């Protein structure tokens, strides 16, 4: 690891050594089986069969691993990575602690699938308080949490988990490895959806698990090999191509979020504004100590579904869409997907549009909705 800064690290992450006549980032290798040496067989090459290995995917894993500061395995989606990690570690009779306000499908997986195979499932809000961790096998936190954007002090929780013999896993989707380095802050594992800001072009699904433990990495690799939730070569290549601009994209998204937070804070028709970068936000003290940059996502409440629809319809630069972290600004009324947020709750994901244009557009749309 060099002392390079974020922009430089993103541009170079996972690239092969320069070779005359070769591209900077080699194109995707499409293969199910590969040619084997007739005598050496699979021992003669890392590439035997596409589910276990692929050179395009290995390069992406090297890149994400460099940014997270650990070893990484890529999965077909964030859900595949998170559920794969949970199932490769947890056994019947174990206890797992999950965020009460985290990504809804993870909670649904826990109460339906994990509880069904005899895992005891506990929940705690991201901001705490956390229960006594004695007897807990694994603690999963999301920080900042999606969609509520609360944060938890990772070094403090890591010390508590270590003392109790529990593994600490951090979902780093919202922050990305440029915004937060959970493995440096004491987590045993990092998981994330690469579908969001990490790749940022709203054109692929991806997930990953990262760790510094050879043992945990081996368990996750075995699980992935046995269950097969791998990303295809083209998606892995697109993701790697997109990583080079991560620093630039996040810089604009954060600037847009800061400007919109300032605007939204003054609106009489907007309540419950959350953005961890606002000094008035309850998450701010921990966020400034722990995050290397603030996320481009904020959340607020417009009161009801109709006002949200009128706001999005009136905005020229805000698309109605779920997911977040992409180039285009989007707004999602989370309750329409059946999660447990209030009907007027909006998660707004800032794109990379010019700040002046975006602020003017959102201000005009809010005027249409009124106080
Ligand atoms: C989107 C998301 C996931 C799931 O990722 P997919 O790539 O959609 O499967 C997990 N955790 C968080 C915090 C997310 O935002």
Image (cartoon, helix red, strand yellow):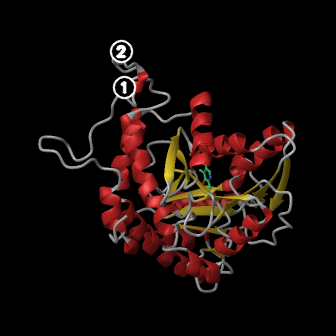
Spatial CA span between label 2 and label 1: 8 Å
202 to the left or right of 305: left
Q: Secondary structure at mark 2?
A: loop
Q: Reading the chain from its start, which is encountered first: label 2 or label 1?
A: 2
Find out if the beta carbon at label 2 lies less than 8 Å from the nearest ligand 1 atom: no
Residue 18 drawn above or below residue 39:
below
Query: At x 74% / y 72%, what residue is drawn?
Result: 127
Residue 76 drawn above or below residue 136:
above
Nearest the eye: 227 or 7: 227
Disc 2: CA contacts within 10 A as few (<14), some (14-19) or many (>=20): few
Query: At x 24% / y 49%, what residue is drawn?
Result: 17
Disc 1: CA contacts within 10 A as few (<14), some (14-19) or many (>=20): few
- Residue 44's mark? 1
Nearest the eye: 148 or 330: 148
Q: Position of residue 263 (x, y in %)?
A: 53, 79
Query: Can you name the residue that lies furthest to the left here?
Result: 20
Q: Secondary structure at mark 1?
A: helix
Locate residue 313: give its quadrant.
Answer: bottom right
Locate residue 90: give its quadrant.
Answer: top right
Nearest the eye: 28 or 150: 28
Query: At x 57% / y 76%, what residue is drawn?
Result: 290
Locate residue 252: give its quadrant.
Answer: bottom left
Disc 2 to disc 1: CB gap under 8 Å: yes
Q: Position of residue 351 (x, y in %)?
A: 44, 62
Task: Say which quadrant the N terminus sits in.
Answer: bottom left
Query: Can you name the residue that lies furthest to the top here?
Result: 38
Which residue carries the number 2 mark? 39
131 to the left or right of 64: right
């Amino acid at each position: 690891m060099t002392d390079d800064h974020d922009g430089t690290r993103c541009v170079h992450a996972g690239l092969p050594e320069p070779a005359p006549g070769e591209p900077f980032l080699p194109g995707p290798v499409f293969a199910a089986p590969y040619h084997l040496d007739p005598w050496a067989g699979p021992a003669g090459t890392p590439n035997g069969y596409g589910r276990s290995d692929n050179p395009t995917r290995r390069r992406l894993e090297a890149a994400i691993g460099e940014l997270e500061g650990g070893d990484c395995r890529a999965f077909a989606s964030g859900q595949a990575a998170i559920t794969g990690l949970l199932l490769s570690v947890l056994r019947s009779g174990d206890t797992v602690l999950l965020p009460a306000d985290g990504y809804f499908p993870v909670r649904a997986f826990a109460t339906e699938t994990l509880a069904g195979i005899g895992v005891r499932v506990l929940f705690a809000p991201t901001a705490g308080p956390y229960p006594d961790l004695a007897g807990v096998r694994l603690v999963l936190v999301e920080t900042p949490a999606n969609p509520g954007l609360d944060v938890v002090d990772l070094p403090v929780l890591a010390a508590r988990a270590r003392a109790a013999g529990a593994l600490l896993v951090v979902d780093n989707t919202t922050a990305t490895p440029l915004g937060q380095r959970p493995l440096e802050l004491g987590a045993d594992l990092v998981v994330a959806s690469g579908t969001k800001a990490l790749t940022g072009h709203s054109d692929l699904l991806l997930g990953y698990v990262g760790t510094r433990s050879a043992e945990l990495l081996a368990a996750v690799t075995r699980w992935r090999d046995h269950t097969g939730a791998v990303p295809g070569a083209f998606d892995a290549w697109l993701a790697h191509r997109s990583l080079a601009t991560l620093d630039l994209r996040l810089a604009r998204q954060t600037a847009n979020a800061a400007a919109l937070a300032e605007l939204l804070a003054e609106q009489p028709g907007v309540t419950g504004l959350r953005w961890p970068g606002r000094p008035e936000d309850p998450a701010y003290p921990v966020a400034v100590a722990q995050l290397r940059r603030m996320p481009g996502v904020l959340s607020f409440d417009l009161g009801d579904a109709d006002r949200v629809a009128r706001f999005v319809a009136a905005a020229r630069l805000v698309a109605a869409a779920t997911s977040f972290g992409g180039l285009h600004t989007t707004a999602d009324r989370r309750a329409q997907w059946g999660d447990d947020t209030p009907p007027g709750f909006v998660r707004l994901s800032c794109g990379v549009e010019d700040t002046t244009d975006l602020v003017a557009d959102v201000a005009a749309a809010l005027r249409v909705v009124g106080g």
